[in-house]
Amino acid sequence: MTDVGSTTRRPVLLASLAALGLGALLLLLMSPAAASAPAQSVSRDEAIEQLDIVRTSIDRTLALVKAGQAEEAFAEARDGYLSHFEAVEIPLRLADAQLTADAETKFAEIRGLITSGAPTGDVRDGIIELRGLIDDAERQLTDTGLGAPGLVFGQSFLIIFREGLEAVLLVSVLLGYLEAAKATQYRRPILLGMGAAAVATVLTFLVLRTVLAALPFGREVLEAVTAILAVGVMFYVSFWLVARLEQKRWLEFLRARVWNAVSVGSTTALVLVGFTAVYREGFETALFYQALVSFGPGLGVPVLAGFGLGVAALAAVSWAIFRLGRRLPIKTFLSTAVVLLMATSLAFLGNAVRSLQEADMIGLHRWPGWPRAPIFLSQALGYWPSRETILAQAALLAVYVTGAVYVFVVRPRRHDRGRSTTTASAPPASSVGAGATGPAS
């Protein structure tokens, strides 16, 4: 006998299961994952374009917060996240899930600070951190390519080779002075001082990194200060006339120290001479590499490769200098190195200005019409299309060009004009001879 109750319950059960299945399907379609399904088709190039829009939105948010327009700032922050950063989340999550979560959290924190009426400084600090996360996101989505690693490799090679060659030339002159003075027994202390200076250079680089990391300032500010110091030293090194005069005085000072040490037979003094001759270049090298590494996230391998090849090339050239002397085209290389150092200083300056902008220390006015380079290439070139970075680099380039025109065009012409004037004012040789012999006859 059939149970009527069970017969009537069966259609109800089936209808309930069907309703549950339909509800689950609707929930699935309405869930955030489903809502963001179209974002799966976003390519990495499109994601990078969205990140650039996010940067502009972040700038607007900060400007609105400073202007006291909290509601407008919140709306801008929410739109920048929902309309643009969410499109980046899926490809970014595949590349770095933790970075994606950190950026999402930072966006939420900034919106919470705005709605709670937090001080402008707190919102500003959050936005500075968010800018760094957006840059890290672009690095995760961008291939390094060939241009950026090649440029950074060349910069790293140039720094160690140029600075090392300068030190080698100084030491070769000092050793030659000892040989001329028949005091070759004092070579060993000078070489020991050179070795100690090389070790001190490495320690200086490590200490610089440790001290800068411990200072109570933002990373962007410290990067900018380091780069500006490096630019100042490069500018000084690149200014031919001043650099030559200083180098001559420096060499005379070292020779005097060697003469004094040899006169009294002081081994310690000779070690200090070798150390002093090399460490000045070593300190510059440590400073330059600190700036290069600071602005080269993701490009550490080319930096190390350039350093390694530079050391090997420097060892080979040093051997050749001691064997061949002046037969090497040292002057040609140093002149070429000056031009390359100028280009490197332009890159450092652009990166320094951009770090100050990211830290909200100076204004940031982007130029949308200017072409934008991939982030790794921008790091290597120091090229960031904003009014402040472009004008700063243009000003430094103008100084270099003016100096080059003076040294290679104006100064030689003045020299030639002075020589021609002196020649014209001097009496002819025959007249001088006649005047000299006339009275005697």
Image: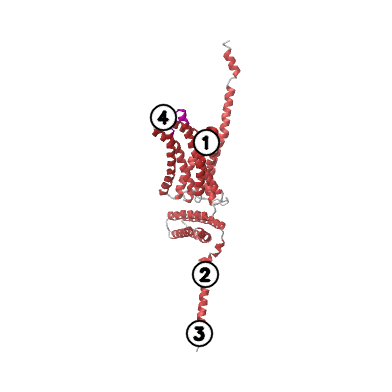
Magenta range is: 176-187
Task: Give the number of the disc on residue 320.
Answer: 1
Q: Nearer the viewer, residue 331 or 429?
A: 331
Dots 2, 4 in contact, CB < 8 A: no
Q: Is residue 375 above or below residue 17?
A: above
| Chain-order first, disc 3 or disc 4 | 3
Q: Is residue 165 above or below residue 110?
A: above
Query: What amino acid is at disc 1?
Result: Ala
Discs 1/4, front: 1
Query: What amino acid is at disc 2?
Result: Leu
| Chain-order first, disc 2 or disc 4 | 2
Q: Which residue is mark 2?
A: 28
Q: Is residue 76 magenta?
A: no
Q: Position of residue 16 (x, y in %)?
A: 50, 78
Q: Main secondary structure of the magenta part?
A: helix
Q: Nearer the viewer, residue 287 or 322?
A: 322
Task: Give the number of the disc on residue 407.
Answer: none
10 Å neighbourhood of mark 4: few (<14), some, or many (≥20)? some
